[in-house]
Structures are given as C-alpha cells and as structure tokens.
C-alpha cells in the first residue's frame, strides 16, 4: 500500500460543469488555505468499460483484463492518501460512470486486498434539484469507502453532515458558483479532512 500525501479528486460527470467546478473549488481551497496538494481526474472523454464479471482479476490477481483508461486511474488510486469522489446526481444517486469505476476497483482489490486500507475518503454530490438525491449519492460513495476499509470523513454536524452537498439548479457551473451553502459544505468537509492528514 502506498499513501503519498495528496488528494485525488475524481469527477463523475461526463461534462465540465457543476461537479467539475465543485471539485476544482475544493482543490484550490485546499491549496490556498492548507497548502495541501491535489490531483484532478475526470471521467469526461475517458474510455471506461463495464466490469464483465469474467473473474480474471480474482483468478490471476494481476488487475483488470480491460486495458482502458482505468489503468491510469488505478495508479492514482493506489498512491493517493485522500480520495474525493464527486458525482452528479443521476436518477437519485451516483452517475453510471462512478458506479462503473467502483465495480472496476474489484480488480485492484483482488490483486491487493489492502490497497485502500486506511486511506481517507470524502464525498461530494451535485444535484439539479435542491433535494434530488445528493445524500443518497454521498451514502453510496461512503459505502464504497467503508467496504474497502477506508476512513470516511464528513464535515460533521451543522452543514455538511455526510459530505459536500451541492445544488446546481440545473445551471451547471453557474449554479454551483451561486450555491453559497453548498460551497460552505465543501469547506467544512475539507476542514475535517485536514485534521486526518
Ligand atoms: C440522466 C440524468 C439524471 C438526472 N437525475 C437527477 C436526479 O435524480 N436528481 C437531481 O437532483 N438531478 C438530476 N439530474 C440533474 C443533474 O444532477 C444536474 O444537472 C447536475 O448539475 C449535473 O452535473 P454537472 O453540472 O456536473 O454536469 C440528472 C441529470 C441527468 C443527465
């Protein structure tokens, strides 16, 4: 297991809009306020194949049979100390892209069952509706962290209970820029996260 001192921000939106803006806001805030380094990675324009349940990863313990853009993400996931998964809310939960990433992580866990152990996990969700499923999406991300022996960190009570919760009002980046409460929830999560690193 490798835990280099940086945050990996994964954007689960297929476009450069609200979710990407929110994750980049987090990355910039971490740098400016805490001088903490991050890296941004997005699913946009990436080739990410479905898990086909071939069990190659379980039998061979050499990672995934697919040689697509997950290969570069696997390396980043292995090295990051903090993982931030940010998702748009699709059908009341995480985007399909984020779900596929989670499924594909089975391959690296099969190769190294401790790959995620003791990494810090934080979650961010952007919904077009004010209450469109952000907390359900966040819970799904936290469940993934928990299942893989990570340490889940939220912003705590009074504003960011489970994670960073944002409302784009279906106006993408512009909507997030004006969601002051949502941006505050990002800052609250990062404040707590820094206590853990
Ligand atoms: C397929 C699809 C399903 C969506 N489902 C929901 C939903 O259930 N709840 C919600 O609040 N917004 C929903 N939205 C709206 C997006 O969450 C919202 O526009 C968000 O800002 C998109 O993220 P982006 O700005 O990063 O592209 C949906 C959008 C799409 C494309």
Image: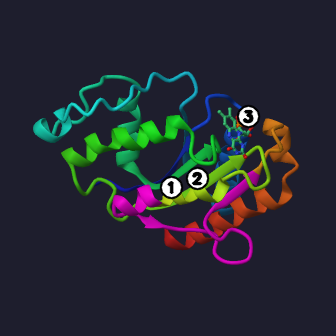
The percent coordinates of residue 130 (x first, y second) are: 79, 53
Q: Residue at x 43, y 39 (%)?
A: 101
Q: Residues within 10 Å of mark 1 (few under 14, many from 20)?
A: some
Quadrant of ligand 1 in image:
top right
**In the rendered structure, which disc, 2 or 3, sits on the residue that comes first in sequence?**
3
Q: Earlier in the sequence, mark 1 or mark 3?
A: 3
- Circle 1/circle 2 CB separation < 8 Å: yes
Does residue 91 show up magenta in the picture? no
| Residue at disc 1, CB closer than 8 Å to ligand 1 | no
Q: Residue furthest front?
A: 91
Q: Can you tell which mark lies on residue 197?
A: none
Q: In this image, 119 relative to 174: left or right?
A: left
Mark 3, residue position: 17
Question: Magenta span covers which residues?
Answer: 143-166
Q: Mark 1 and mark 3 in contact? Answer it, CB < 8 Å.
A: no
Position of the N terminus by quadrant:
bottom left
Rendered residue at 22%/54% (across/down): 113
Report the residue marked by disc 1.
140
Q: CA distance from mark 1 to mark 2?
A: 5 Å
Residue at (65, 51) in percent of width and height: 125
Disc 1 to disc 3, how far (Cα)? 22 Å
Mark 3, secondary structure of its residue? loop
User: Does the magenta segment cover residue 163?
Assistant: yes
How many badges with numbers are in the image? 3
For this rendering, which residue is in front, 148 or 39?
148
What residue is disc 2 on? 137
């Amino acid at each position: 297991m490798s835990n280099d001192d940086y945050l990996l921000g994964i954007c689960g939106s297929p476009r450069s809009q609200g979710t990407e803006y929110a994750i980049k806001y987090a990355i910039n805030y971490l740098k400016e306020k805490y001088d903490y380094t991050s890296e941004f990675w997005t699913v946009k324009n990436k080739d990410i194949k479905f898990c086909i349940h071939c069990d190659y990863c379980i039998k061979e313990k050499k990672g995934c049979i697919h040689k697509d853009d997950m290969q570069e993400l696997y390396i980043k996931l292995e090295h990051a100390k903090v993982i931030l998964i940010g998702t748009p809310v699709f059908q009341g939960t995480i985007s399909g892209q984020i779900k596929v990433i989670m499924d594909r992580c089975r391959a690296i866990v099969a190769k190294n069952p401790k790959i995620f152990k003791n990494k810090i996990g934080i979650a961010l969700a952007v919904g077009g509706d004010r209450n469109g499923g952000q907390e359900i999406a966040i819970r799904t991300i936290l469940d993934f962290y928990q299942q893989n022996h990570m340490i889940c960190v939220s912003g705590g009570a009074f504003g960011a209970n489970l994670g960073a919760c944002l409302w784009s009002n279906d106006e993408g980046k512009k909507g997030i820029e004006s969601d002051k409460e949502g941006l505050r929830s990002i800052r609250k999560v990062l404040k707590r996260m820094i206590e853990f690193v």
